[in-house]
Image (cartoon, rainbow, N blue to C red):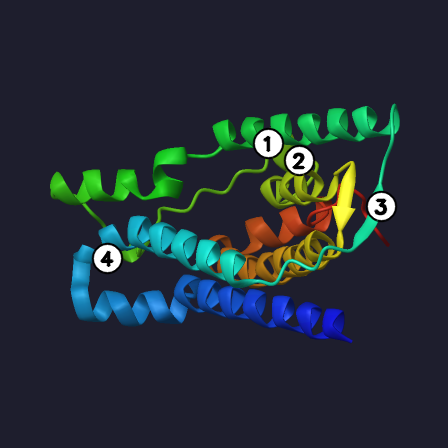
Amino acid sequence: MSYFWDVLLIILLFSIFAFSHSVFASLWFKNLLAKSIGSKIAFYRLFYNFISLLIFMAVYYLMPKPDVIIYDLQFPYDLIILGLQFLSLFGLVYTGFKINGKEFLGLSQIKRYVQGNYDINDLDEKMELRIDGIFSFTRHPIYLFSILFWGLRPYMDLFYFVFFICLTIYFYIGAFFEEKKLVKLFGDSYLEYKKRVPSILPIKFK
């Protein structure tokens, strides 16, 4: 029974992180913030990333770690899974080079603010519509490779399994709300893109 409460607490703590992360990333919150601080919202992206990391680390630390083994792959299957995990990490890094890393981190925004040419309509990030390369197979390659990296493990315990399930569900929920913003920004161009390319898994279901 104690494992049940451990699992429940893991889900609850992850939900706290997910809720705060989503609220602070929402358009309504950013618009409200922009009305209050004006072009200084250029600093928000860097602040948001830093705070999100701190909350994530705190939540992860506070989560119970029930030591229940779900599976433990033996040789050579452990090496096969590790190889696939390495490939997913390579895919994650590759995708990172395909996006504007400085914009994602919040550094480009601060540079534009210091130079005096920050557009407040960008809010905290100048969004770009990427539909080429890896983005022609999946609309959210970072989510895809993150799920694969976290899920492909030669050893899985109860804590990590529950955490992985929560993370995967949150990626799908996050993709849904993120795309609502992208439709507002890019209109029909993004709607056409959605028709052609699957969301996370590079499989088009009819």
Q: Nearer the viewer, mark 3 or mark 4?
A: 3
Q: Nearer the viewer, residue 33 or 164?
A: 164
Disc 2 marks a residue whose amino acid type is Ser
1 or 4: tag closer to the N-terminus: 4
Please provide percent x and percent y for residue 105.
36, 42
2 or 3: tag closer to the N-terminus: 3
Q: Which residue is mark 2?
A: 136
Please provide percent x and percent y for residue 165.
71, 58
Disc 1 marks a residue whose amino acid type is Asp
Is the residue under label 1 in contact with that under label 3 (CB below 8 Å)? no
State which quarter of the image contains the C terminus: bottom right
**Splitting the image into 4 quarters, where does residue 32 fall?**
bottom left
Is the residue under label 4 in contact with that under label 3 (CB below 8 Å)? no
Disc 3 marks a residue whose amino acid type is Tyr
Rounded to the nearest angstrom, the CA distance separating label 2 from label 3 is 35 Å
Is the residue under label 1 in contact with that under label 2 (CB below 8 Å)? yes
Q: Which residue is mark 1?
A: 132
Badge 3: how crowded within 10 Å, few (<14), some, or many (20+)? few
Badge 2: how crowded within 10 Å, few (<14), some, or many (20+)? some
Rounded to the nearest angstrom, the CA distance separating label 1 from label 4 is 30 Å
State which quarter of the image contains the N terminus: bottom right
Say which residue appears at 32% left-offset and 51% top-offset.
45
Q: Is residue 63 above or below residue 79?
A: below
Q: Which residue is mark 4?
A: 41
3 or 4: tag closer to the N-terminus: 4
Please provide percent x and percent y for residue 155.
77, 40
2 or 4: tag closer to the N-terminus: 4
Q: Which residue is mark 3?
A: 71
Secondary structure at badge 4 equals: helix
Rounded to the nearest angstrom, the CA distance separating label 2 from label 1 is 5 Å
Say which residue appears at 87% left-offset and 31% top-offset.
74
Please provide percent x and percent y for residue 99.
47, 34
